Amino acid sequence: MKESLLFLGQAVRHYRTAGTFTQSRPALARGIADAVGDVPDGRVILELGPGTGVVTRELLGRFPRARVVAVEVLEAFASRLEETAPGVTLVRGCASELESHLAGLGIAPEEVAAVVSGLPMLSLPGELPQRILGSVRGVLRPGRRYVQFTYFRRAWRRFTLDGFQQVTCRRVWLNLPPAYVLAFVRNG
């Protein structure tokens, strides 16, 4: 309950950053983790916009031999994540600066197995979504996955995803509201 109230409070204060008034449900977290695919031991899963950590905890449980690095811009969510997901490496900052964040942690792009995003790309202002997608492209090597969830699949057509090919789209009905999990592979 405490987590739900925290999410609602942050959503009201920062709607464009949170993107919704309800936090992700476990079924959506499982769908996102499924879309990541295989992750070799010791590789990094980069999570953008972890919020209260529903997906983060699923990733930590599903990939115990991987390093989960979460990038969160809202301080309230970052503080909560430190309490509830002690196995995560937390970065407080913007997802448009992934190369810099990883360099600060001593992580090379070759170590990144996948990028998972809960960011509300459709509600972010101006060019920020394209800058974030460019940042994702900069840290993912060919053949690796970018997984994004959205509530409006058709609206994603407005984004230019140069360097990526969509490989799957799955509807998760047991989420409020129902969501789509889009998986893309980085082209060569």
Image (spheres, helix red, strand yellow):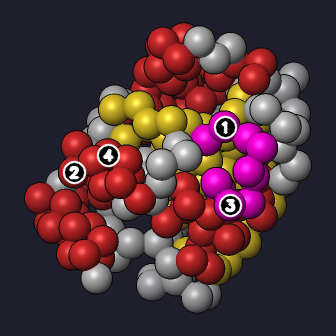
Q: Is residue 180 visible?
A: no
Quadrant into which the N terminus falls: bottom left
Residue 7 or 136: which is nearer the viewer? 7
The kind of secondary structure element at disc 1 is strand
* 38 w.r.t. 132: above or below: below
Answer with mark 4 or mark 1, whichever residue precedes in sequence. 1
Q: Secondary structure at mark 4?
A: helix
Kindly identify which numbered label has been placed on residue 61: 3
**Residue corresponding to mark 1:** 67
Q: Nearer the viewer, residue 140 or 66?
A: 66
Where is mark 4, residue-wise? 78
**Residue that mark 2 sits on:** 76
Residue type at mark 4 is Ala
Q: CA distance from mark 2 to mark 3?
A: 23 Å
Choose the circle earlier in sequence order: 1 or 2.
1
Q: Give the extent of the magenta segment.
A: 59-68
How packed mark 4 is, by other alpha carbons closer than 10 Å (few <14, some 14-19, many 20 or more), is many
- Report if the CB atoms under discs 4 and 2 are less than 8 Å apart: yes
Report, in whole angstroms, how far the alpha carbon at label 1 lies from the one at label 2.
23 Å
